Image (tube, rainbow, N blue to C red):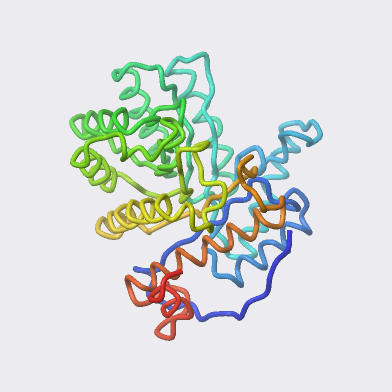
């Protein structure tokens, strides 16, 4: 992927209001080889990313197109990732998907096994596409409680992602589970990808729901959110084909309001405000005029700068460059 150069910026010591931007590595060429990975990590550090998000299969060197490996080889690959991340001072959010024959117990066993492997790479958090949408609420609450137990046992934050076909697959399902966990004092941590709710309904979910109900769900979500996957959803195929284009300005501005609410919720609770700009890993069939590979990288870089600029316009600094914020003027003028 093309890695454009830009001037280095000063990182302040006060981290409280520093927006922690993570770069997703799904679909990024070169991360499977140590030399390519180090080149990408060098660039990410210069661009002041806090860390990366990568799937457990990527961290273990397995997946589509990869040669078959034994457990020892997978462990050795995770160790190489750990050393590369530590050398570049980058944090890691590991993503994983629970599996099983739709039983809570099997999904929790899958989670604990994968979480232990992710801990080998010193992941600061897990983003989990977990459970099954078809479960009744008692099963979902049991699963959420089991996730909290795994997190406590392994001492690693386990964060459930809003995702179609999983628990938290719709706004109303999420509201019900949040309320049940609050009543049962189960610590439910959520990674909010609100584009998934748009994908599920093939529309901006807020347009088909009562505005007060939407506001209530998002406010409640802000008390559980621990990270944000910032993908712009829309009614065409669940995600905007190119969020830079003006024809998606309504979807973009709507999601920006949602993201602001969630990030503010993290700040209020003293949780590090973490966000991953997300576009891809494949281009939409409706993405006219957008070419593969380089444009995926460029669009995600654009989105990262957009989030820094918006954060700087709200808080006076993006958290990367101190009082002379490179992004502040850009954010005030509109990105």
Quarter placement of the N terminus: bottom right
Percent position of residue 86, x then y? 61, 61
Viewer-side residue, 69 vs 5: 5
Q: Is residue 156 above or below residue 289?
A: above
**57 left or right, relative to 151:** right
Q: Name which residue lies at 43% across and 54% down.
A: 252
Between 158 and 295, the residue placed more toward the observer is 295
Q: Residue furthest bottom?
A: 324
Q: Residue furthest right?
A: 67
Figure label count: 0
Query: With 80 as the anchor, is 208 left or right in this view?
Result: left
At x 39%, y 84%, the residue is: 323
Question: Which residue appears at 29% of the width and 38% of the height?
Answer: 187
Left/right placement of residue 263 relative to residue 102 reads left
Which of the 4 image quadrants contains residue 270? bottom left
Q: Is residue 21 above or below residue 228?
A: below
Where residue 177 appears, as percent x and y from the top left, is 28, 29
Task: Report x, y in % for residue 194.
Answer: 40, 42
Q: Quadrant of residue 195?
A: top left
Front residue of this view, candidates 145 and 165: 165
Q: Position of residue 159 (x, y in %)?
A: 41, 41
283, above or below 253, in the image: above
Q: Residue at x 52, y 60 (%)?
A: 303
Q: Is 10 in front, or is 233?
A: 233
């Amino acid at each position: 992927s093309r890695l454009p150069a830009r001037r280095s910026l000063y990182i302040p010591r006060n981290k409280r209001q520093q927006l922690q931007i993570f770069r997703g590595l799904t679909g990024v060429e070169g991360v499977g080889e140590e030399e390519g990975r180090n080149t990408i990590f060098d660039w990410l550090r210069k661009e002041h990313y806090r860390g990366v998000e990568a799937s457990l299969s990527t961290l273990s060197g397995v997946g589509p197109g990869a040669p078959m490996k034994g457990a020892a080889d997978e462990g050795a690959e995770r160790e190489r990732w750990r050393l590369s991340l530590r050398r570049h001072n980058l944090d890691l959010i590991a993503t994983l998907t629970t599996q099983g024959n739709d039983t809570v117990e099997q999904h929790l066993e899958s989670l604990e096994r994968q979480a232990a492997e992710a801990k080998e790479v010193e992941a600061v958090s897990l983003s989990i596409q977990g459970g099954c949408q078809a479960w009744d609420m008692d099963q979902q609450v049991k699963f959420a409680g089991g996730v909290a137990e795994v997190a406590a046992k392994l001492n690693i934050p386990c964060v459930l992602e809003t995702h179609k076909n999983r628990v938290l697959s719709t706004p109303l399902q999420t509201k019900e589970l949040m309320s049940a966990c609050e009543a049962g004092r189960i610590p439910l941590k959520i990674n909010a990808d609100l584009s998934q709710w748009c994908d599920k309904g093939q529309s901006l979910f807020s347009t088909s729901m009562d505005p007060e109900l939407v506001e209530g769900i998002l406010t409640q979500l802000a008390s559980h959110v621990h990270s944000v996957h910032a993908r712009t959803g829309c009614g065409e195929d669940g995600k905007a084909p190119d969020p830079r284009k003006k024809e998606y300005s309504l979807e973009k501005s709507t999601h920006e309001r949602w993201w602001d609410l969630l990030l503010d919720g993290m700040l209020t609770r003293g949780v590090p405000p973490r966000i991953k700009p997300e576009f891809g890993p494949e281009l939409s069939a409706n993405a006219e005029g957008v070419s593969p590979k380089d444009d995926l990288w460029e669009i995600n870089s654009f989105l990262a700068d957009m989030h820094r600029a918006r954060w700087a316009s709200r808080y006076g600094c993006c958290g990367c460059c101190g009082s002379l914020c490179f992004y502040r003027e850009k954010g005030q003028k509109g990105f």
